[in-house]
Image: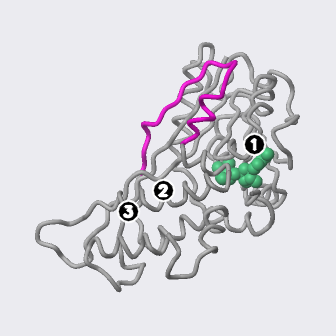
């Protein structure tokens, strides 16, 4: 269940792509909309709960005088310290209980793709304690929404085919597996819908409108999925031919009449769709 622990998980996460910088700008714009924050150029403190190797926190550093990240996996924290050499950023090994910050000191509490692993009530209790009255808790991540496949051999009528249905089948296979295993990743695949419902004691809003695209090959798409320790573990339960990730790859090739082509020769456009949960006083 705790697929995120250990050195191996930290290694796998290094291959996980970081969000484009406009995602941090989007969160900062939301923070500035809170009454009293409109004119701030630089805020005091951001805390990133479950910061991993710090790649999401990195884009927030310029907006804050101080940044703190914590993560339960000491190997992730070591990587964050190694890669982020900033005098304003500190990292520690810890969990959502008893965050190492003063009461009402935090402008922005981030939780990027980690909340489904945490105890929600404990996280919210700490959120209530540490946030300033003008503070914001921003929880977000992306899930996969669309996939276009380019025809490798020129096709007179069509340049691309819609592979979203094939992507959805793969997602459904994963979802069923995690539901049966009672694994928190099912809630992540569900875009934190239940977590959002369960939040009480805050003003809350969600936004599912932001998307971004990657042009990538099938080889890179497979690497993307394998850069999550949980999905990698699932993939390794199967042989080459029966692995759902590989079946998705073969189906995408068939869709554009490209059976037998190398994975790195199949060009895709992959759309990720963000989900943001914003909590404030
Ligand atoms: C999907 S990764 C996201 C990492 C980082 N937020 C990012 O955006 O790259 C989830 C992280 O949550 C951490 N984590 C899981 N449970 C935790 C807990 N109870 N307290 C702190 N960190 C936790 C894992 O170790 C892992 O680094």
Q: CA distance from mark 1 to mark 2?
A: 24 Å
Q: Residue at x 68, y 52 (%)?
A: 183
Image quarter for residue 281?
top right
Q: Nearer the viewer, residue 73 or 30?
A: 73
Farthest residue in the bottom direction?
A: 260
Residue 126: x and y in percent read 80, 29
Q: Which residue is pictured at 66% across the width and 68% down the height?
A: 233
Whole-percent x and y of residue 237?
63, 73
Say if mark 3 contacts mark 1, CB within 8 Å: no
Q: CA distance from mark 3 to mark 1?
A: 31 Å
State the scheme by which the image is colored.
one colour
Disc assigned to residue 118: 1
Report the residue marked by disc 3: 166
Q: Is residue 79 above or below residue 259?
A: above
Q: In terms of secondary structure, where does tag 2 sit?
A: helix
- For marks 2 and 3, give the CA distance: 10 Å
Viewer-side residue, 254 vs 172:
172
Camera-nearest residue between 63 and 20: 20
Q: Which residue is mark 2?
A: 172
Q: Earlier in the sequence, mark 3 or mark 1?
A: 1
Q: Position of residue 96 (x, y in %)?
A: 81, 39
User: Can residue 24 be spotted in the picture?
Assistant: yes
Magenta residues span 191-212
| Cβ at disc 1 under 8 Å from ligand 1 | yes
């Amino acid at each position: 269940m705790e697929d995120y622990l250990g050195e191996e998980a930290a290694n796998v996460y290094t291959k996980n792509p970081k969000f484009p910088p406009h995602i941090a700008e989007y969160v900062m714009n939301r923070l500035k909309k809170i009454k009293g924050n409109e004119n701030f150029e630089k805020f005091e403190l951001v805390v990133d709960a479950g910061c991993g190797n710090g790649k999401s926190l990195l884009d927030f550093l310029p907006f804050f005088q101080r940044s703190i990240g914590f993560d339960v996996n000491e190997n992730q924290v070591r990587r964050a310290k190694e890669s982020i050499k900033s005098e304003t950023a500190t990292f520690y090994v810890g969990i959502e209980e008893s965050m190492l910050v003063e009461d009402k000191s935090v402008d922005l509490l981030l939780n990027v793709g980690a909340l489904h692993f945490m105890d929600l009530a404990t996280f919210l209790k700490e959120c209530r304690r540490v946030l300033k009255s003008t503070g914001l808790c921003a929880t977000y991540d992306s899930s996969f929404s669309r996939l276009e496949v380019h025809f490798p051999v020129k096709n007179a009528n069509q340049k691309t085919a819609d592979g979203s249905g094939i992507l959805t089948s793969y997602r459904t296979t994963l979802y069923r597996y995690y539901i049966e295993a009672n694994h928190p990743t099912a809630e992540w695949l569900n875009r934190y819908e239940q977590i959002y419902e369960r939040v009480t004691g805050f003003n809350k809003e969600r936004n599912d409108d932001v998307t971004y695209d990657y042009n990538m090959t099938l080889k890179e798409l497979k690497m993307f999925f394998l850069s999550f320790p949980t999905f990698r573990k699932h993939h390794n339960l199967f042989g080459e031919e029966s692995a759902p990730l590989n079946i998705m790859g073969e189906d995408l090739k068939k869709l554009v009449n490209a059976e037998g082509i190398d994975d790195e020769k199949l060009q895709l456009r992959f759309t990720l769709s963000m989900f943001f949960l914003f909590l404030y006083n």
